[in-house]
Amino acid sequence: MKQQRTHYCFRQEAGSSIYKLYIYDDVSAYGTFNWNTWEYDESKTSADFFRKELDIIPEDATIELHINSYGGEVKEGIAIYNQLKQKKCKEIIAYVDGFAYSIASVILQAADRRIMGLGTSLLIHNMWMRVEGNANELRKAADDLDVLMESSRQLYMERVNITEEELIEMLDNETYLTPEQAVEKGFADEVDSTRTSAEDITQQLQQQLQQMRREIILQKSFREEMKDFLTIVGQKKEEDTDNEDNGDNDNEDNDSSGDTGNTGNDEEKKQKVNKQNDLVALLGQAATKYLKER
């Protein structure tokens, strides 16, 4: 039995709100002709099939659209483009995994973010069609193509940063674009962010060094504050010791004079001072330990 080729894939990542769509073949309204039924199978790259899949995606989801296509039917591609533009969702991110040629490059423009993978390419060109008939019919077909091309150019002009005259010239010349060229001219927003260049690495190292400097400065500042704190603690303990000695002398004098009315109050004051001293001592020990560890 012949294995069926995958043209289109719809998948939700488990446990996430990301829905992935894959267009990995020509965009077409009809699928493969089935010789058993003498009918065309359902196309998995048609606008109608795309509509059904988009209806499943909730409004709070992110859509990842992966493209690898030579293009296909303009009618179907334009409809898919507009379906994506009309879709209510959190964000649409399009990834070019291989080729985004012809109408596939138009579909790409519907995404909020357009990312070109490494080694990928984009192709834009004028529409063409097969036609037969007399001279008048051939001239009309050419005029019709001009109208279709004018309409199609507006989809590019919504996103690109070149003039329409430059776009027309590129279409006439059937232009291929590298990822960097696509970004430069506005057909894409970025090249695959997973790429790490030497410049990126240097920038990351510089940022890390700056962060380390800030941390060192903060540690030095904290150590100075702790030293000041310990100095104040030492001075406080000396003052308290002197006060206790003076208090004892006063109590002895009071005892000798027979005045014992303030004995209870003095005892409470001593207990309060002792608790304060204990607290200060604990803070001092903690600060000393921190400074040693640093």
Image: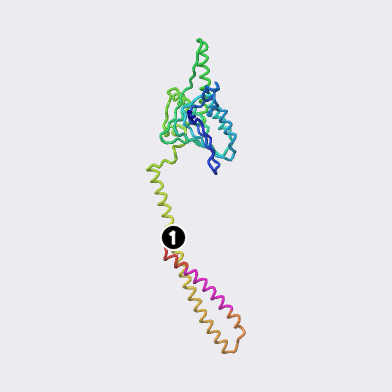
Corner quadrant of residue 270: bottom right
Residue at the outermost left position: 198
Magenta region, mostly helix, strand or loop? Answer: helix
Q: Residues within 10 Å of mark 1 (few under 14, many from 20)?
A: some
> Where is mark 1, residue-wise?
219
Counting every numbered tag in the picture gives: 1
Seen in the picture, residue 21 relative to 34 is either above or below; the reply is below
80, 231: nearer the viewer = 80
State which region is magenta: 268-285
Label 1 SS: helix
Let me know if residue 291 is in the magenta part.
Answer: no
Residue at the outermost top position: 134
Provide residue 99's location: percent of width, then percent of height: 45, 30
Seen in the picture, residue 220 relative to 209 is either above or below; the reply is below
Provide residue 8's location: percent of width, then percent of height: 51, 31
Q: Which residue is at a point 52% across and 82% down the rendered structure image?
A: 246
Provide residue 15's location: percent of width, then percent of height: 55, 44
